Image (tube, rainbow, N blue to C red):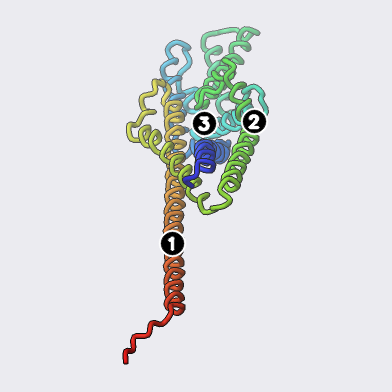
């Protein structure tokens, strides 16, 4: 290991191996965690639907004076169950847009009870005030329904994907997301190539592979542990300035979860690296002990052979 011809290339490859380990681990983590099913489950576990529901109710209470439509027309006909359905549709459409590179255009589920409540209010209002139910009346009625669906959809858009879509950010993210499998394959191929190259360079002493792989894994783990532990311990994401409670909750909790998973992964890398290094030093220690015993045995055998071949000296005196 101390020979420059093997040590220097091994050191360089181990440095690249560190970044490949981090990259491959991150790619696998993204493949496992960033799916529509996982995100829907996450939203329910973190009670983000409750916050979305409360935010929609608050919006209609605040706008009631300006629109002249009582908040109860909307709030009495928008249930938590319906909000969950809309949120699920939004999340699935988000990942569909990422996967296909298309636009974010969720098909909000219909709410017959809400539409009937709006119809009833408009008709009752027209009957009481003598307002003519002409084309203008119908347009206003349809506009109110569309606005209601848009408000619900925006309230359930917990990651503000519609905003990202309008600013062109969703397309950029889609390019990266669609290449995740290729990127994962490239990183794992690089890992295999680097480990194989290390084995070839150290073919005269193959157990040294344990040292270099263990060292790279340990360093990769430490590099991941330090920033992850800092972000979690300082509650860094809580400093984000996001006004909507459901959006704030969604982003911060998602980031905390991903950071926690990355921390666990990094701890595993560090532990595996430490075990590999320990095994290497144990094996190396045993090897040196066995070599020393063999040398000592050879030397003792040589000494006994020399004793047998030593000429006898006559000491008898007459």
Residue ID for mark 3:
83
Q: How dense is the environment of label 1, judged by Cα within 10 Å: few (below 14), some, or many (20 and up)? A: few
Residue ID for mark 2:
178
Which of the two labelled residues, at mark 3 and mark 1, occupies the earlier sequence position? Answer: 3
Residue 161 visible in this rendered orientation of the protein: yes
* Viewer-side label of 3, 1: 1
| Circle 2/circle 1 CB separation < 8 Å | no
**What numbered label is drawn on residue 286?**
1
**What numbered label is drawn on residue 116?**
none
In the picture as drawn, the residue positioned furthest to the bottom comes out as 318
Q: How dense is the environment of label 3, judged by Cα within 10 Å: few (below 14), some, or many (20 and up)? A: many
The residue that appears at 50% across and 41% down in the rendered structure is 4
Relative vertical location of residue 307 with respect to residue 217 in this rendering, above or below: below
Q: Picture coordinates of residue 179 (x, y %)?
A: 64, 31
Q: Picture coordinates of residue 280 (x, y %)?
A: 46, 54
| Circle 3/circle 1 CB separation < 8 Å | no
The foreground one among 221 and 82 is 221
Cα distance between the residues tagged 3 and 2 = 29 Å
The foreground one among 147 and 130 is 147
Q: Picture coordinates of residue 272 (x, y %)?
A: 46, 50
The foreground one among 113 and 197 is 197
């Amino acid at each position: 290991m101390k020979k420059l011809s093997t040590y220097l290339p091994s050191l360089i490859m181990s440095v690249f191996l560190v970044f490949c380990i981090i990259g491959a681990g991150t790619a696998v983590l993204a493949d496992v965690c960033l799916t529509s099913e996982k995100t829907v489950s996450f939203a329910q576990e973190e009670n983000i639907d409750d916050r979305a529901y409360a935010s929609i109710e608050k919006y209609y209470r605040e706008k009631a004076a300006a629109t002249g439509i009582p908040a109860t027309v909307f709030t009495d006909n928008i249930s938590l169950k319906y909000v969950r359905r809309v949120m699920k549709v939004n999340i699935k459409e988000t990942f569909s847009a990422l996967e296909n590179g298309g636009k974010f255009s969720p098909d909000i589920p219909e709410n017959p009870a809400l539409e009937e409540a709006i119809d009833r209010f408009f008709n009752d209002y027209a009957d009481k005030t003598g307002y003519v139910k002409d084309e203008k009346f119908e347009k206003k009625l349809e506009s109110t329904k569309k606005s209601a669906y848009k408000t619900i959809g925006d309230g359930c858009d917990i990651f503000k994907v519609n905003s990202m879509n309008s600013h062109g950010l969703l397309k950029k993210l889609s390019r990266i997301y669609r290449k995740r499998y290729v990127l994962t394959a490239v990183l794992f191929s690089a890992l295999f190539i680097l480990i194989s190259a290390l084995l070839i360079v150290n073919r005269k002493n193959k157990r040294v592979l344990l040292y270099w792989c263990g060292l790279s894994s340990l360093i990769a783990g430490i590099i991941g542990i330090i920033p992850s532990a800092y972000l979690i311990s300082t509650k860094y994401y809580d400093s984000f300035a996001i006004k909507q409670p459901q959006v704030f909750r969604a982003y911060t909790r998602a980031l905390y979860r991903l950071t926690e998973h990355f921390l666990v992964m990094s701890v595993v890398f560090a532990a595996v690296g430490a075990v590999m290094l320990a095994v290497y030093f144990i094996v190396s220690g045993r090897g040196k002990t066995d070599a020393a015993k063999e040398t000592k045995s050879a030397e003792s055998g040589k000494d006994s052979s020399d004793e047998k071949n030593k000429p006898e000296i006559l000491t008898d005196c007459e």
